[in-house]
Amino acid sequence: MTTITENNSARGSARLALYIIIAMLLGILFGYLVHQKAVNVDMSYIGLLSDLFLRAIKMIIAPLVFATLTVGIAQMGGGAGVGRVGVKALLWFVTASIISLFLGLLFATLFHPGQDSGFSALTADQIAAGKSRLEDFTKGVHDAGFVAFVKSQIIPTSFVDATANNRLLQIVFFSVFFGIALGSMEEKAHAMVALLQQLSDAMIKMTGVVMKTAPIAVFAAISSAVADKGLGLLLTYGKFIGSFYIALMVLWALLVVAGYLFLGKRVFELLTHIREAFFLSFATASSEAAYPKILEALDKFGVSRKISSFVMPLGYSFNLDGSMMYCTFASLFIAQFYNIDLPIGTEIAMLFTLMLTSKGMAGIPAASLVVIAGTLTQFNLPIEGMLLILGVDRFLDMGRSATNAVGNSISSAVIAKWEDKLYPENSTAQS
């Protein structure tokens, strides 16, 4: 009976991944027809479908993270176990961050996407038209520094406020302390732990229901983006987009190689399990949308829920590999466009600055753009250059989000392997 259930689950997963791919292709076609005025439709209604899906996913994330993480910590064996896993996770995250930032620097220097790009210099009218958008990002710069991040994003003043605003790191902080407290209570906490386990299972069930609508949301998201910008924009920015995606593919390959070093051939099984999450995060340009699906995929792969429920939320705050690569790539693109020659020392300083400021991405809307704005300001680069990339940011965000999903999945599996909490595929991953 178990084998039949697992086979049905695998077939359902493969079908959903196929439906998502088909929805992406149909969305591109429909969006192109709308952009070309061949189809007359109000895209605000189409885009609403994607927004509703993302809101439904975000509705699930806070209680899911709280329940799974608290149960995992309570069963982990106290603060020593939490600290050990946390140190290993941060070691992986810092290493991945340095590699991601360096690759962005390397490929921007190698391809020079800002030179001979065919773009005309921005006119005063264009800068004035984009002034309000620039002000939004420069305003966010003051809240994106590392010190401000530590002060405002880690310890919640209210758990209710943290959950209401989906501040993952604050939820993690509260859940860790709550889980340690429950773990110290031993038998007295059994009822509470069992209740939270039931809450976690209920959230996973809700995710399954919401995910049935994923192809519709993917169609809406892709068609809205193409209808708004058109495919011609991709040709205009071909050098910039193409070189960035080449850099991303190299990063994907390195992540898989790193996974192979620790997981062996099982890393390819992991990639099979997370394919839905990959396509979903790519199509919706949201790695958050894939969070519940990744957690479910890690369960099937054999990662202990004690590990995945702790490492995944941390990863969404500290291990945004694709976003960090984009920060260096886009900053150097703007410098190259304005023919500003940055010495290698300045580029290295920029890399380490981004290493710190990127850790303030959690909970900030349009986080990558805010961090880029701060970097441009700090290194006296023209902040109006951001107007060059705003038009295609959605298409680039798709790749960044998918990369973040892959990076966090592999990191969770590797850390589970280190902790001897990686079990055979489709085994019970709750222990």
Image (cartoon, rainbow, N blue to C red):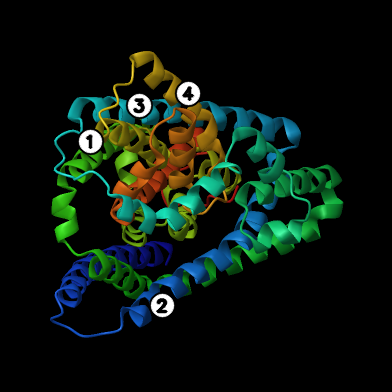
Amino acid under disc 4: Phe
Write down the quadrant of residue 152 in the picture.
top right
Circle 4 Cα neighbour tier, 10 Å, few/some/many (<14 / 14–19 / ≥20): some
Q: Secondary structure at mark 1?
A: loop
Residue that numbered label 1 is attached to: 114
Q: Is residue 209 left or right of residue 62?
A: left
Return the mark for residue 48.
2
Sequence-first tag of 2 and 1: 2
Image quarter where the N terminus lies is: bottom left
Where residue 122 sits in the image (x, y, percent)? 27, 47
Q: CA distance from mark 4 to mark 1?
A: 22 Å
Residue 11 position in % (x across, y down): 30, 66
Residue 31 rendering spot, x and y as whole percentages = 21, 72
> SS class of the residue under badge 3?
helix
| Residue displayed at 63% across by 40% down | 149
Question: Can you give x and y, in whole percent of width and height, for residue 233 in the image?
Answer: 19, 57
**Residue 396 visible in the shown view:** yes
Kind of residue at badge 2: Leu
Q: From the viewer's perspective, is 150 left or right of 405?
A: right
Question: Of the residues tagged 2 and 1, which is closer to the observer?
Answer: 1
Seen at 77% across and 42% down, the residue is 180
Residue 48 lies, with reference to residue 20, above or below; the image says: below
Give the spatial CA distance, label 3 vs label 2: 43 Å
Alpha-carbon distance for marks 3 and 4? Answer: 27 Å
Q: Earlier in the sequence, mark 3 or mark 2?
A: 2
Front label number (3 vs 1): 1
Question: Earlier along the polypeptide chain: callout 4 or callout 1?
Answer: 1
Say which amino acid is labelled 1. Answer: Gly
Which of labels 3 and 2 is toward the front? 2
Instruction: Name the residue carrying label 4.
Output: 352
Front in this rendered view, residue 249 or 181 = 249
